[in-house]
Amino acid sequence: MILFTSDLLFGSKILGAAKYAGVRGQGVRGRASLAQHADAATHYFLDLEAELALGESADDLLDAALGHPPLRVFVFAGHLQTEALKRATAKIAASGASGHEVHSRGSLNARLSSILPPNAPAATESR
């Protein structure tokens, strides 16, 4: 699981859900680190409101993620960021890929346990 956000509180929530699901989470800071970790990941969470390095844009990071077909991409932003959320939805639709989702923070928070389902503890034998 790859996460791109500068929101420490929400990022911790996503990383915690990944850990609880038994999925290793990795934070990234740009396209280069996304490319480095994408082949080993199954999920990519992109915060459209994250602070970006010089020369980086949320659109570029979304394009880079969509360029790795095995990744399920989850884009999110605050509910007031309607234009950014609409652009991301349109970009994902234009890619023709399925399984990607765009959410407000609240919506993503509500779906985290179904996106990253908790890893069921191993059954123990009773004798």
Image: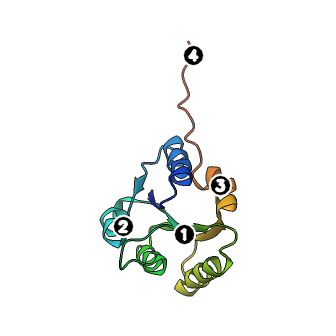
Q: Which residue is mark 3?
A: 109
- Image coordinates of residue 5 in percent, x first then y, are 48, 61
Residue marked by disc 2: 34
Q: CA distance from mark 3 to mark 1?
A: 16 Å
What is the spatial separation of the Cα atoms under label 4 and label 2, in whole angstroms?
45 Å
**Viewer-side label of 4, 3:** 3
The residue furthest bottom is 94
Q: Which mark is residue 126?
A: 4
Q: Amino acid at mark 2?
A: Leu
Q: Nearer the viewer, mark 4 or mark 1?
A: 1
Q: Does label 3 or label 1 sit earlier along the sequence?
A: 1
Write the residue at 40% across / 54% down.
Answer: 26
Toward the viewer: 27 or 125?
27
Q: Secondary structure at mark 2?
A: helix
Secondary structure under tag 4 reads loop
Tag 3 and tag 2, C-beta contact below 8 Å: no
Q: Position of residue 126 (x, y in %)?
A: 57, 16
Q: Badge 1 is on which residue?
A: 49
Whether residue 84 is situated above or below residue 73 in the rendered picture: below
User: Amino acid type of disc 4?
Assistant: Ser
